[in-house]
Amino acid sequence: MNINATLIAQAIMFALFVWFCMRFVWPPIVGALEARKKQIADGLAAADRGKHELELAAKRASESLHEAKMKASEIIAQAEKRAAQIVDEAKSAAKTEGDRMIAAAQAEMEQEVFRAREQLRGQVAALVVAGAEKVLRREVDAKAHADLLEAVKNEL
């Protein structure tokens, strides 16, 4: 065997092996690598989008929470205002009712005073008539009249 022929045959076989690998083995490997590279890039892009969407969602949630707090404080303020208004209305109604009751009591008191005066006048008139009757039955005596008049005065 000749070493030169062996070297040439090995070189030709190596060239055929390289051609075979380049033609049939290398494209599927490169395709698989490209597909994996694309899949990784898509995954990273999706992760970036997810991170961005998460930040947006957190921002929207914060804004919604702030808006809800504002609405809650507004509702509380309205409720406090309405409560104060109801209390004021109740105070006004109570004052009106109290004034009405005072006026009614004063009117009733005035009627009672009027009745008492009328009753007292009737009693005074009866006493005067009784005193005059007593004075007229007795004899005319200044001292006796004075005593009777003093007695009538004491009775009033």
Image (cartoon, rainbow, N blue to C red):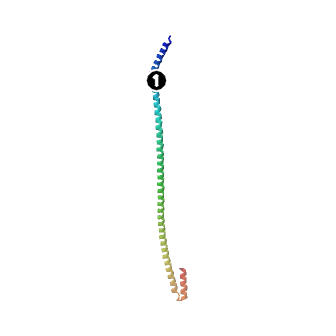
> 156 or 12: which is nearer to us?
12
Q: Residue at x 47, y 27 (%)?
A: 33
Q: Residue at x 47, y 50 (%)?
A: 70
Amino acid at circle 1: Trp
For mark 1, give the secondary structure: helix
Q: Residue at x 46, y 18 (%)?
A: 15
Up the image or down, 11 lies above or below 125; here it is: above
Up the image or down, 17 lies above or below 80; here it is: above
Up the image or down, 48 lies above or below 139; here it is: above
Q: Residue at x 54, y 86 (%)?
A: 146
Q: Residue furthest front?
A: 4
> 60 or 133: which is nearer to us?
60
Q: Position of residue 138 (x, y in %)?
A: 53, 87
Q: Which residue is mark 1?
A: 26
Badge 1: few (under 14), some or many (20 or more) residues near its Cα, within 10 Å?
A: some
> 108 or 15: which is nearer to us?
15
